Image (cartoon, grey):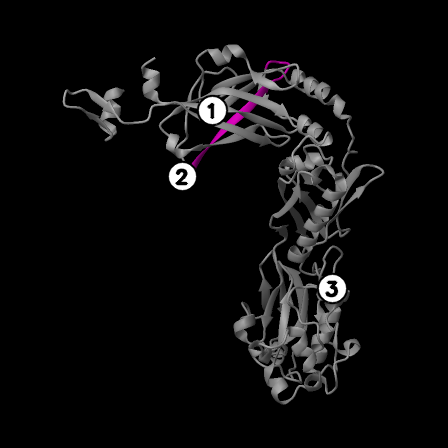
Amino acid sequence: MNQYLESKDPRRKRDNQGNLIDSLEKKDIFVPFKCEVPPGTSTFEIQVPKTYLNRIFSFDNIMLISNLYAEQAQSFNEETEEELREVLSYEIYIQAVFITEKKDKFYGPTYEMPPGVIMTADLVKQINTYYESNKPTGIVTTPVFFDWVDLRFEKVTDKTFDEYYQSMARTYYGEDFDVSKHWNALPRSARKVFGVNNYLLPTLLVGEVLENVRLRINIAPNSFASFSTDAHLLSMGFDSSQYGNRKYKNDNFKIENKEFAKFWNITGNQKMLPELIVTPNKFKMFMEVFEENFISKDYSLQITKKDSIKNERFETELKNAFLGFEKTGNISYGVTYNETAKRFQFMFPRNDRMVNMKVVLPRDLAERLGFELNIEITPKNSIGEPLVVVDPKETEDRARALSNETGLIIVSDYNTGTNTTVGIGKQYMAALYPTETGNMVMHVNEICNQQPFMTLPIVNMTNEYIPVTFLLSRFLNNNKLVNLVWKEGFTMQGTLRGVHPFNMNSK
């Protein structure tokens, strides 16, 4: 082994007498760690600096501490302000499946322009009104609406958006700005969409106004608009580069929003025509969901450790999360906390065309809210269990009962397979035993004897640290070894010792 290392390592040389000079650092190194393990999780990870890749590792000591003690410390106000200011972060997301059929669109029946509509502005207003009134239950904002912009505002530097548009009222409408006439022109559900123009479309569409006003179509996330004819789109100022060509002879023109997390707006490339282009083709339009299986982006719910013991604060932060989903995904889910019953409840739309609706939580958050280890909340299990307030004085009894019922815990190297440990295919590293306090620790005999060793996994070496994963296992009554699963979270802490192989050879 020494000859191999000598040949492979340029830092190992011989002096004038031929003796081997070893310039490598051979001292033992130590990696203290403290890892939070959420409920229902059977692994934990230690970050080891990659500079220690040439060491082999064993546990100097390792301990499992139930989070019951952390809850007790909070209730006794034993934690420092610095600890209480620590921010806990939970990644959550929502899911839904939309039922779409050729004859029965998710967003409702096809819009058909009635006879007698001549003006482009009237068609725009009709479309806005139609889809607002047919907005499905559970959808926050109408799936499509038109607003407008004035291209001249792009060059304005001395006025805000509202100052400019209100100052142009006489040019747009032939009278001073009147909030009751010229404001809130958009459908009610569309007024809070970021960046929209809620002012009335100019009624004096002549001269410079006509040259600079552009209609804009806004399409909800994961949705598309389908048009039977392009003459009316051309009248609105959109051209073929924006709505494309028919794929088939009887196909429609489409404007799509494949994004799952925001409205998509397209400003017409051309000026709108005050009057619609006359065509024998009847104008029809429908809205539909683009992808039936909807999965939102993650929302990071953050709360301080100090506030995490307050159910009302969790309710507030969860409601903020769902407001975020409403703004991005356009879907309305909700949550409430019943102070009397001490229960959280999630709320879902009553829409038979939305199925497989879920709120997906991390295990520790699900446990905290009373849903045990069930991370997928659905309409069928939307109400959590009562959150029982436990006397802090019972903490040690609860921790002791849990650890004794669990019994022996085996810690193994998750990255290394072996057949040397009966009942598990991973490299054995340590055994933890219950104590009188309910914590789990290494037995003194294991600490004194030579410990089993492991090497670091070879991973992306551009990172400063190498993640090392360990598996926790327990025995069932039939002596079968299974992954450790607790409804309570816990903390793993201790020290990894890194020993140079030469030190092992010299022993």
Contact? badges 2 and 1 (CB < 8 Å): no
Horizontal relation, residue 102 to residue 340: left or right: left
Mark 2: amino acid: Asn
Q: CA distance from mark 2 to mark 1?
A: 21 Å
Where is mark 3, residue-wise? 189
Q: Secondary structure at mark 3?
A: helix
In the image, 252 versus 191, the foreground residue is: 191
Q: Does residue 285 lie above or below 445 as drawn? A: below
Mark 2 vs mark 3, foreground winner is: 2
- The main secondary structure of the magenta stretch is strand
Residue 172 appears in the picture as rendered = yes
Q: CA distance from mark 2 to mark 3?
A: 48 Å
- Look at 34% across and 23% down and name the residue there: 26
| Horizontal and vertical percent position of residue 238 | 58, 76
Label 1 is placed on what type of residue?
A: Leu
Classify 124 as above or below 356: below
Per the image, label 2 sits on a secondary structure element best described as: loop
Choose top left, top right, bottom left or bottom right for residue 498: top left
Write the residue at 23% across / 31% down.
Answer: 10
Residue 340 percent across, percent down from the top left: 85, 38
Q: Does residue 30 appear to the left or right of 36 in the view shown?
A: left
Against 287, residue 342 (above or below) is above
Report how far apart the C-alphas of labels 1 and 3 lie in the structure. Answer: 57 Å
The image quadrant where one finds the C terminus is: top left
Q: Quadrant of the N terminus?
A: top left
Q: Which mark is residue 496?
A: 1
Packing grade of label 2 (10 A; few <14, some 14-19, many >=20) is few
Which one is earlier in the sequence, the residue at label 1 or at label 3? 3
**In the image shown, does 358 or 405 lie closer to the viewer?**
405
Instruction: Identify the residue position indicated by label 2 in the image.
Output: 460
Residue 216, percent across and down? 62, 73
Q: Which residues are magenta?
A: 464-479
